[in-house]
Image: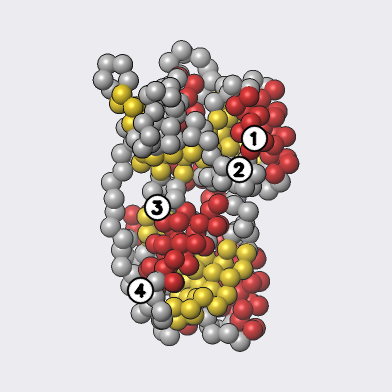
Amino acid sequence: MTRLLKVGIAAAVAFTLTACGTTAGTPEETPADGGTTTQAGGSEAPAAGATEEYEPGDVVTPKDGKKLKIGAAFPILDQFLQTVADGMQARADEAGVELVVVSAQERADVQLSQIENFISQGMDAIIVLPQDTDATDPITSAVTAADIPLVYVNRRPAALPPEVPYVGSDSLIAGHLQMEALGELAGWEGNVAILQGDPSQEAAQMRTQGCKDIIEEHEGLNLIREQAGNWYRDRGLAITENWIQSGDKIDIICSNNDEMALGAIQALKAAGQLEDVLIGGVDATSDALVAMEAGELEVTVFQDAKGQGAGGVDTAIKLHNGDPVPSVIDVPYLLVTPENIDEFK
């Protein structure tokens, strides 16, 4: 199969966030359908369990005039997550809030210890990007027991209480967008391999499922390989080298992120097979956009890192203010192709 460069562009959707803050009303205020509740004076506030879509608005500031100190616990500060941290810092600076960022170097035990330190330091709010989305109960319990506002960002916990908000994107949609575009390029025929992120994390689980959903809808697409590269470029390179050596014909690589996709590109270039494989990633990192302009990466999916960071800070401040917030603040994904790449530079 020859390499194609045209990709159908997904329609952009406008998103508006009308309110954020503490999640739940009283039991009698919370409707069974997880919609909105009516507050005194007739205004509507999001109920526990509600989802709203996010668009950056005016900066949120503490109503009590306090100089807030917010702790942000990251699993690691790679290229993408550093951009999330930068978005948080920019928003914190606008709001006059002190932000303390720590990285756990991908160790869940270290992250829990760092969060316990935040609690002992008396942080006014805590933002967490969990290392292990299947094991966040100790974090949630510790922070909420200390009566400190808690916001999860970017990586959605498997167990997310409705009163603890999450700011991020629906990873299932990312998998759908990239695989739909790759499938269309391939004429809905070919062998597919999936490069998966860390299997313990919701983003890897759901992006992989999104790829599989589209594959299962088309008889001409066959999933023949799936392996975890834990988000790293060198792992994407090594895994793809092994796939090449196996002799299996691979027509499409659906990668959970750009870093692993870039590793796959390196392996295929070295083997002289890049022209025969369609590759998609997620995140729209600067390196990925360079690869796309070079004709090496077919598609990626923009994840608004700065928007997630800003939304996390806004939500933390609103929780401090006692304002209502929905349980989920959705920051939408957008498909990036050679046709619309200039919008994402």
Above or below for 212 versus 20: below
What residue is rendered at 54% in x and 20% in y? 68
Secondary structure of the residue carrying tag 1 is helix
Q: Residue at the location (34% across, 35% down)?
A: 35
C-alpha separation, residue under disc 2 versus residue under disc 3: 20 Å
Q: CA distance from mark 4 to mark 3?
A: 19 Å
Q: Are marks 2 and 3 in contact (CB under 8 Å)?
A: no
- Looking at the image, is mark 1 or mark 3 earlier in the sequence? 1
Q: How packed is label 1: few (under 14 Cα within 10 Å), some, or many (20 or more)?
A: some
User: Can residue 296 be seen by looking at this rendering?
Assistant: no
Q: 325 left or right of 234? A: left
Task: Compare marks 2 and 1 and give the one earlier in the sequence.
Answer: 2
> Which residue is label 4 attached to?
184
How far across and how far down the image is residue 300, in percent? 43, 62
Label 1 is placed on what type of residue? Ile
Q: Which residue is mark 3?
A: 333
What residue sits right under mark 2 in the picture?
130
| Residue at position x 33%, y 27% in the image | 37
Question: How far across and how far down the image is residue 76, in percent?
Answer: 63, 46
First in sequence: mark 2 vs mark 4: 2
Dots 4, 3 in contact, CB < 8 A = no
